[in-house]
Amino acid sequence: MTTPDPRTELLPPYARALDMIITGLHNGAPLIEMPFANKVQGRPGFLHGGAISGLLEMAAVAAIQHALHERGDEATFKQVNVTIDFMRGGTPQTTYAVGEVTRLGRTMANVEARAWQDDPAKPITIAYLHYLLKRV
Amino acid sequence: MSTKTIAELAAEHGGFDPRIAISFMGKAGHGGFLGMDYVGHGEDWVELSIDWREDLVGDPNTGVLASAVVISLMDNATSMSIWTKLQEFRPQVTMDLRVDYLRPSPKGAKVYGRGYCYHLSHSIGFVRGIAHNGNLDEPLAHVSGTFIRVGDRLG
């Protein structure tokens, strides 16, 4: 198990309940790890697609927070939708995920979040998420 | 937890029964963690629910559920709608899902997910669904997706 980054404290209860931790930065965005456990298992021996989706959602949120902070932007954001491609079955091992903010505009953000296990070049699942940005 | 597979249970009961399937799918693994319950079903739909819980919250400031809770709920409800329409269990995996969040699921509210299978081809199950808080006419999310059969195919 890798040492958690202090940013792990910022993860919401849902992420903490599934033992997700932030371990550092990967390509300039927070890297999140989720250990395999019965509570994230779907069909026997495989991760539940919803648990992988949860990991991707947390990676996407962490990526936006990081990107907004980087440009000194205090906007808040709300998820509008998500499209998820399940490409490979998740096996009983640690899963990694990172979000890439492909566009951070004035009113919306596009994020692509990827999850992998053995090899970052072989994603098991990719999520494409849209967020509405709000400023007071 | 039962050690029987869904296929074995379906064979014992002369077909796929979502009420029986959820009685163990809702207790094992991720479904058990979320506490998924059976609500109802028809020829081509299955409705499940998850109670609001503090540890399922995605935004501690508002108490709103993590949106992935809705994804897990709709993944299971739509997946089971295919077996219900088929009247038997066939192994399948989720190819993709899209979720549009019309509004958040408020703090304390039980979330319901009704999944429909609207078309079956040889290999693909086409599904859609609605998540709500007790009134189908007040949806909180719309879902669409596809499942691909693995192993034996229809036809």
Image (cartoon, rainbow, N blue to C red):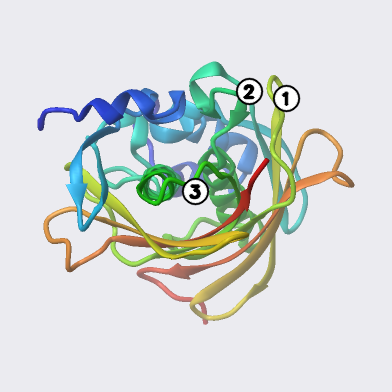
Label located before the other in sequence (2 or 3) = 3
Q: Residue at x 69, y 47 (%)?
A: B46
Q: Chain of mark 2?
A: B
Crowding at mark 2 (Cα within 10 Å: few <14, some 14-19, many 20+): many
Q: Position of residue B35 (x, y in %)?
A: 54, 25
Q: Position of residue B119 (x, y in %)?
A: 67, 74
Up-down relation of residue A12 to residue A110 (above or below): above
What amino acid type is highlighted by mark number 1? Answer: Ala
Q: Nearer the viewer, residue B152 or B55?
A: B55
Q: Residue at x 42, y 34 (%)?
A: B30
What amino acid type is highlighted by mark number 2? Answer: Trp
Q: Nearer the viewer, residue A37 or A80?
A: A80
What amino acid type is highlighted by mark number 3? Answer: Ala
Q: Are the residues tagged 1 and 2 within 8 Å (C-beta)?
A: yes
Up-down relation of residue B24 to residue A83 (above or below): above
Crowding at mark 3 (Cα within 10 Å: few <14, some 14-19, many 20+): few
Residue that badge 3 annotates:
B11
Label 3 vs label 1: CA separation?
Answer: 36 Å
Label 2 vs label 3: CA separation?
Answer: 34 Å
> Is B132 left or right of A90, judged from the image as shown?
right
